[in-house]
Image (tube, coloured by chain):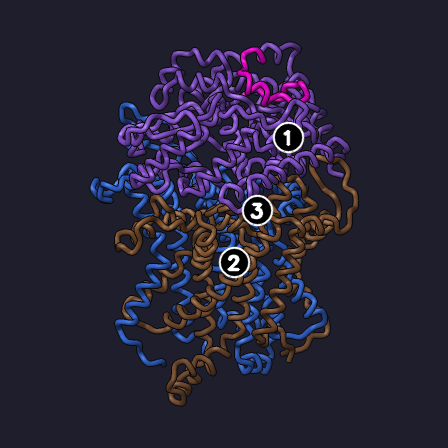
Amino acid sequence: MWSLKRFPALWLLPALLPVALMTIYPVAYALWTSLHSVMLLFPGEPFVGLDNYKRVVSSNYFQDALRNSLVFTLLAAPLVVVIGTLIALFLQRRFFGSQVVRSIVLLPWVLPGAISAVLWIWVFHPSFGVLNGLLRDLHLIDGSIPWLTSPRYALVSVVVAHVWTQIPFAVVLLMAALSGINSETLEAAAIDCRSALKRFRYIVFPEIKAMIVVLVVYNALTAFTSYDLVYAMTGGGPGTATTLLSFQIWRESFSMYDFGSGSAVAFIVVAISAVLIVAITRALPSDLFAEE
Amino acid sequence: MQRGLHPFLTFLFASLIVLFTGGPVILSLIGSVVPDRILLDGSKGLFSEGLNFETYRYVFTGQLPDSYLAENANRAMISDAARQVPQSLLNSGVIAFSSMVLNLLIGAPAAYMFARYIFPGKKLTFMFLILSPLVPAVALVTPVYIMLQTLGLVGTQAGIILVHTAKALPFTVLILSVFFRKMPSEIFEAAVLDHCNHFQTFFRVALPLALPSIGATGLFAFMLSYSEYMFSMVLSGDAATRPVSVVMAALARNTDVSWSLLNTAIFIAIVPTLVLVIFVWRFVVEGLLSGAVKG
Amino acid sequence: MRTLFAAGMLATGILAAQPGAAEDLTLEFVVWNYSLETIQDNVKKFEEANPGIKVKVTDYTWPDYQDSLVLRFRGNTPTDVIYGGQDWLPAWGAAGFIAPLDSVSPAGAVDELKKDIAGFALTDVTYKDKVYGLPYYADTISFIYNKKILADAGIAVPTTWEEVTAAAEKLKAGGMEHPIVYEYNQELPNFYDAFVAQAYGRGAELFDKDLNPLFADPNNEAFKQLQWLADAYAKGLVQSETHESKIIPAMNTGAHAFTIVYTYVLAALNNAADQPRAGEFALAPMPGSTHATLGFAKSYVVTAQAAADPARADAAWKFVDFMAGQPYTVAKRWAVEKGLGFAQLPLFQDKDVIDAWGKWADVKSLGDQAAIAKAGTYTEYSSVWSAYFRPLLAKAMVGEASVEQTMKDGADRWNQLKEQFANR
């Protein structure tokens, strides 16, 4: 690592400026809104301190949404990274048709949330869904399983769909990281260590740990703030079984015309996300932020 | 390298992966060539009437499917929104490509700085970049909209490109910094010995080595922009500038779009990007697996 | 700063304009994108008849429409004429976003047109005794059933909700897993509307004339209807769909017999071009003692922004009058070409409309239903209240909350909002 005396403005400003533009003012605005009573129907925007926060946190909707978002994240993020790692490791080999598989794996990535939702609705639909049809043809079930309309199954179904959309990205990054491992290291390991599992644990994993941390953080964030896919698949239902915190933000602002409360929920999401990220980076230390 | 896996297991895993990732897409392909009246009728075999490409014809030419020309069919009950798909693909392509290029041009130098240098304010700015995507986009819609309204960018592609670029940058920088970090120091020491300045080292040494990773990151930025919905929706005002994510969301909730037409639109939306992605991915993968990064 | 800039531009524009060569005025028309090609064609015809006025169409999708419009209002994006919805009209009127039509129209024009507007639609476009919109599309919520399935099973068309349950149970015993398919999405205003429609069928009054909520009383018909819904779900008679566009393929698989949706969905259900079971669906009067249902109207509304500028106000009125005023050519076109319902009374007698609609519905029953349809209760805070109430309704339906508690919470919140709004 080299040391510089001055802040390398030329290198960094082009990146920092757009981000700052899209972040500083909007976030400040949102923060200000959350501390004031900003409702479309009422003139004036008086300062109300933490009232919006208190009101939002004590509502039933919030508690359901928080629980769902947390469960969703705790299921989705690890699943994506684990499945992504397994697929990436598998696809490192060359076998007949491996190039085709590597291309097909990318398919879920090219789809906007609305499309993925339609496809998975088709898979899970009670009346004309493919999964139910298949299970029925295989005589595994009699009636159709209400994947999307039963509180028990709905959350799991949307997790499956979400994981599906995030896997290609994980695979791409992990394959890139895996290919960065020195081949001599791997050959030496193959000689020293017979067990593939041990090789992974002691040789491969440490090399890709930084990328795994990035992926876990990214997926936790994405899952926690997820909106498009789940909304298109279930609209938050049945009841509040798949209602996520991101829905509440939109709802408070645009359906209830209460921008103050909407922003308050947003910042609660920020606080929780920050906690999540700190927890993850503490649990999986890597040299991402180290200074030599 | 690692010992080969039993061929059967390889085949099994490969099939599972293909089924899981590709299955739903194949579904949409089938749905697009089988009209609703057969698809929904459990008693008829799926392909009993052969393959039907009339929905594709409708999207590209506006010519109604034959069934709509029948005596008592309601000619008007097919939505023209489906015909916006090809144009929207172009729009999405332009927006996503611009966002990707901007991300790489601006993000790579920044990532390189963070990866290989220490300087005053490093921790602060790095933290700022990493923490900026924390606030959910949903909460930022109003201020961003107002800001872009003042700049006169609402309803333009430039506005959407700006927002998408800013959205992807933190991740672009983060991911590329990981890649730059992993490069062996010896290469850089050699460059210094050759009297390369910072920029030359970056441009002539680091960049070529990082090409595959840059490909992967560029792909990410492209995808993020392509599939983004919320800002695209509020910032695009008419069909001429509207990206495909917004058009698709509308089609999915349109009563006058039959299931078959919807799947046609979906498949049309998938194909060009898939081709592009595969093309770039080949470039990336070939680069990765042929040892471009290895010392 | 920006106003100064705009004023400067305006001044320059006025100075630069040659006398006698008027600049084209551009109206900003914001719509949801149902049949955009038809809208654009209508606009073209207006432009041809009105040289000097251009209309720029901006469209959003229906689910995003309200939110996008709120953003436009808050961001002061130029907007002149919009599609208005009955549930937002009072709120937007109270917030000063929209203007009463008589502020932009020639004296007496609106009163003339009022005479031709159906009852429930007129209520929907009126706020504080002023008419804010002319109807674009009006419809009712219908109880729709599959004729063939009922006939094959020997079941008579149900006329009360108890009969619906009996019919559904008989069908379920015969192997139909979920005889009723229902649009269940707490994020959509229609979710509440459908409930109100059913309650109206029973003759329910949800609010008294002073806008006090009545539905928390267990003897209230709306209360009973929620109970009916909860029971139907508990008995496994109902399958939920997130959107009406999924109800169409679902019903066409023949796996369901009943649904409750906007009437125009019937046209899609019976679409011979696509649907395997086209022609098997019909509407029945809403079950319940009065068979009334909910009627609603979407309208063309002029924004306060436009009304404030005399030139734009004039152009905006011309446009609204063209689209929804006499001789109702545009409204008729929507009805005949697209099967869209309307609120302009003369069209009910129009032969072309009757012929076109005969393809997918019995026009007489449609007319009968429209005649007894009632408007919903909309106040400045009702859409906010509805957003609050819908998740409660959703939970009660699937048994996650008691009907009693749900209705009580709804009534409490309504009263709270009413008071809050009165004191603002």
Q: Secondary structure at mark 1?
A: loop
| Residue found at x 41% / y 76% | B291
| Mark 1 Cα-neighbour bin, 10 Å: few <14, some 14–19, many ≥20 | many
User: Residue A72 got which mark?
Assistant: 2
Tell which subunit mark 3 falls on: B
Query: Taking A65 as reference, is A176 left or right?
Result: left
Q: Which residue is mark 3?
A: B231
| Residue found at x 51% / y 18% | C343
The span from disc 3 to disc 1 (Cα, nearest Å) is 39 Å
The mark lying in front, picked from 2 and 3, is 2
- Colour of chain A in the image: brown
The mark lying in front, picked from 1 and 2, is 1
Tell which subunit mark 1 falls on: C
The span from disc 2 to disc 3 (Cα, nearest Å) is 24 Å
Q: Which residue is mark 1?
A: C213
Tell which subunit mark 2 falls on: A
| Residue found at x 46% / y 64% | A80
Compared to residue A33, the image places residue C310 above or below, namely above
At label 2, the amino acid type is Phe
Same subunit, tags 3 and 1: no
Q: Is residue B60 visible?
A: no
Query: Taking C66 as reference, is A45 left or right?
Result: right
Q: Quadrant of the N terminus of chain C?
A: top right
At label 3, the amino acid type is Phe
| Mark 3 Cα-neighbour bin, 10 Å: few <14, some 14–19, many ≥20 | some
Report the front residue among B180 and A74.
Answer: A74
Query: Taking C320 as reference, is A126 left or right?
Result: left
- Residue B66 part of the magenta-drawn span: no
The span from disc 1 to disc 2 (Cα, nearest Å) is 37 Å
Magenta residues (range): C114-135
Chain (blue): B
